[in-house]
Amino acid sequence: MQSTPLEEYKICLFGSEADKLVPIIQSHKNLALTRADPDLVVCYGGDGTLIAAELRWPGVPKVPILNSRLGHRCIPRPPRKVIAAVARGEMIWTRYTKLECEVFASKHRREPDFVLTCLNEVNVHMGRINSAVRFKLWIHSIPFENGVEMISDGFVACTAFGSNAYFKAITKGIFTRGIGLAFKATTHPINHLILPEEDDVRFQITRGPVTLAFDNSPDYFSLDAGDTLTVRKHPQSATILTCEPVIALDEPF
């Protein structure tokens, strides 16, 4: 949908070289720089800058401008032209599904110990290089493959937006809607899965240790046997502004 022009956008700049955009922002009367409660976050960098901005300002619309050698999720246009389009209200607003991951690391608890939110993926990997991850999987409370214990280097649960990252590296493909599950170096053939967005997925670690990471957050967690993760669609989406409609997620913005 087309953005609605506002009298003023409060804009926060994000990125290691984002200060270079200050004069451009200041040249537009209806754009004002802020450090708190922004209407928009202008990300100047690569895909990692955009992902980090969503972690820091969840749900606040992002304008990702490319300032990196790689960046499929960033606008490869001169910043002056992109910001002028923002000021004129000409950007295309698109919402993307996010995931939430509830982690139950204490036995017999009904409430999760903590909840993670991600735009790209939840990534579980073996905690020791010489010790495989063992786990079981339920989809909508139905045991996957009759409840067999799966043995692998770990697994990834991702959004369609994030399927161009680790999921693609494992499966050599992407998807456009749903929740993707990719399994790393399993001991027996297991098809990767693309589930409806309405499904919830539960993993139980049957042998650890394992390491849990999400998006490009610097925080990661150690889990062990008996710990469980529940992954589902998050009620909040991410909003990203682009100059052109996004036709295919495997094409650069």
Image (cartoon, rainbow, N blue to C red):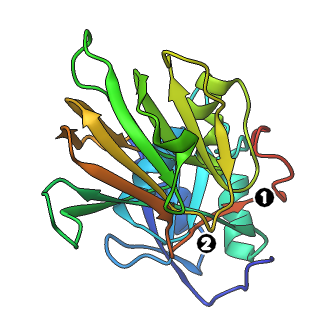
What residue did someone put label 1 on?
Answer: 243
Rendered position, 173 above or below 140: above
223 sits left or right of 170 in the view: left
Residue 73 drawn at (x, y percent): 65, 44
At mark 1, the secondary structure is loop
Residue at the limit of the structure toward the bottom, as seen here: 7
Q: Tell me the residue at 79%/38% (across/down).
A: 251
Residue 93 drawn at (x, y percent): 71, 70
* Res 170 quadrant in image: top right
Mark 2 is surrounded, within 10 Å at the Cα level, by few (under 14), some (14 to 19) or many (20 or more) other residues, namely some
Amino acid type for the residue under numbered disc 2? His
Amino acid type for the residue under numbered disc 1? Cys
168 sits left or right of 253 in the view: left
Residue 80 drawn at (x, y percent): 67, 53
Is residue 99 something that shows in the picture? Answer: no
What residue did someone put label 2 on?
Answer: 28
